[in-house]
Image (spheres, grey):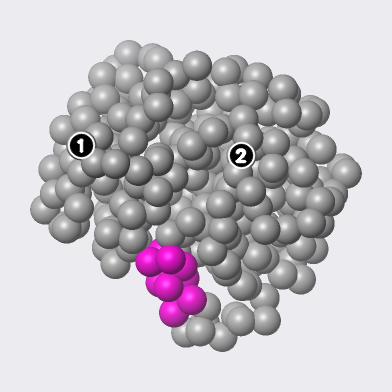
Amino acid sequence: MSKTVIPYSQEQGTKKEQVADMFNNISKTYDFLNHFMSLGIDIIWRKKAINELKKDQPKLILDVATGTGDFAFEALSILNPDKIVGVDISQGMLDVAKQKITKRNLGDKFEVKLGDSEGLPFDAAQFDAVTVAYGVRNFENLEKGLADINRVLKPGGKAVVLEFSKPKAFPIKQLYNFYFNYITPGIGKLFSKDSRAYSYLPESVAAFPDGKDFIAVMDKVGFTHTKCRPLAFGICSIYTGIK
């Protein structure tokens, strides 16, 4: 198993406590930096991930690590479910999501709550689909988090995970590593009050078991028909599995 990477190596606290603190610190600038640093490509990747659920037409969706809600808002417009519930361990990120929900008058379609991915505050077999966008690499215990996602899914329900991966082809690998390890932390330091958050990003991606290794964990906790779909030469991947 890959080593555990935490946001603040000089501080006390579990990974999930530190991740919550980190996202609380960057919540105000998160949306801007996300789109700016990805040149807006993250929006295209999110749409591709959401389209994995189009033929399933889920009515009740759980969005784990929902953050400021961008993935859920996109899912609402594309899939038109009855409701999406978003859960996150960062109250700061959820506060931003709540402001956006109120502004868009979507309180009846999208609700958010504070919660831990490894102990989701929901009954078993409750959701038609579960989504996670750029959140699984922040789980303290990946296997436990995926197992709990499986637990809250209805039989036949689908999980869709969008996450950074590690491109292997030249010169994409070299360009990606340079951008992630040097440019991203620099931009983060310039615009965010927590520069460490943006050096944690490449470290967490490097340590994350992507591709076949991630699929193996999904299989282990009980998902079937698991698939990995690389995007943009392997910079990002969409993982799907059925309960």
Magenta-colored span:
91-99
In the displayed image of the protein, which residue is found farthest to the right? 155
Q: What residue is rendered at 48% in x and 76% in y?
A: 98
Question: Which quarter of the picture shows residue 60?
Answer: bottom right
Q: Is residue 139 visible?
A: yes
Q: Position of residue 224 (x, y in %)?
A: 80, 28
SS at badge 2: helix
- Is 163 included in the stretch rendered in magenta? no
The answer to whether mark 2 and mark 1 are in CB contact below 8 A is no
Residue in the foreground of this view, choosing between 61 and 46? 61
Label 2 environment density (alpha carbons within 10 Å; few <14, some 14–19, many ≥20) = many
Query: Picture quarter containing residue 83?
Result: bottom right
When the figure is inspected, residue 113 is found, relative to residue 167, above or below; the finding is below
User: Would residue 152 appear left or right of 14 to someone viewing this image?
Assistant: right
Residue at coordinates 65% horizontally, 52% vertically from top-left?
120
Q: Which mark is residue 145?
A: 2
Residue 10 in the image: x percent, y percent?
Answer: 20, 37
User: Who comes first in sequence, dot 2 or dot 1?
Assistant: 1
Q: Main secondary structure of the magenta part?
A: helix
Q: Find out whether residue 94 is within the magenta segment.
A: yes
Q: CA distance from mark 2 to mark 1?
A: 25 Å
Picture coordinates of residue 180, whole percent (x, y): 26, 33
**In-front residue for pair 40/220:** 220
Residue 115: x, y in percent? 56, 58
Structural crowding at the residue carrying mark 1, measured as other residues with C-alpha within 10 Å and reported as few (<14), some (14–19) or many (≥20): few
